Amino acid sequence: MAKKLNNTENRKIILEIFQNSNKPLIVEEIVKIMFEKTGKKMILSTIYRNLKNMEDVGILKKTFNEDGSYMYILKGENSCKAEIECEKCHKTVEIQEDTLKEAEKTLEKLGFSLSENIHLKGECKNCKES
């Protein structure tokens, strides 16, 4: 039997935060955004419990940051995204869907499918020229 979640005010706010985000979020970012939205500080254990419950039922996906910390992202039918970030200025550009589709076709030929977001790092044109 699939686990169901009650639709609490905190979960609604957390879900809205992820729906308005185009990147994985760490808990500290979620806390900050929640405070900005509500004016209230939420207890960390409450946030972690909500994130865990939302992950358990398939709403969120937990991934890892480069430093090993947890990040969460909204999981959906078409939630796989690709982006590239400049290591110098941190400008981030989403890779266009048609380009990502080509990568998926190549991976399918190799017997793979994308299930994670892709975050590439490099150097943008402006930083290269300076």
Image (cartoon, rainbow, N blue to C red):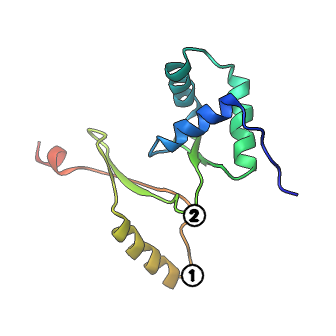
Give 41 or 10, whichever is nearer the viewer.
10
* Residue 87 x, y percent position in the rendering: 31, 43
108 or 58, which lies in front? 58
Residue that extends furthest to the right in the rendered view of this protein: 1
Helix or strand or loop: what does disc 1 sit on?
A: loop
Q: Position of residue 128 (x, y in %)?
A: 16, 48
Quadrant housing the C terminus: top left
Residue at left 70%, top 32%? 48
Q: Nearer the viewer, mark 1 or mark 2?
A: 2
Identify which residue is drawn at 52% across, 29% down. 29
- Relative to 96, is 73 above or below? above
Are there few (<14), some (14-19), or many (20+) residues within 10 Å of tag 2? few
Q: CA distance from mark 1 to mark 2?
A: 13 Å
Please, what is the three-letter code of the amino acid marked with disc 1? Gly
Q: Is residue 45 above or below residue 50?
A: above
Q: Are marks 1 and 2 in contact (CB under 8 Å)?
A: no
Badge count: 2
Residue situated in front as seen by the camera: 30 or 84: 30
Q: Is residue 69 visible?
A: no
Which residue is disc 1 drawn over? Answer: 111
Residue 102's x, y, as percent?
Answer: 38, 76
Specify the amino acid type for callout 2.
Ser
> Which label is found at residue 115?
2
Q: Residues within 10 Å of mark 1 (few under 14, many from 20)?
A: few
Which quarter of the rendering shows the N terminus? bottom right
Residue drawn at point x = 25 percent, y = 50 percent: 123
Left or right placement of residue 9 versus residue 130 in this view: right
Q: Position of residue 45 (x, y in %)?
A: 73, 25
Which structural element holds mark 2? Answer: loop
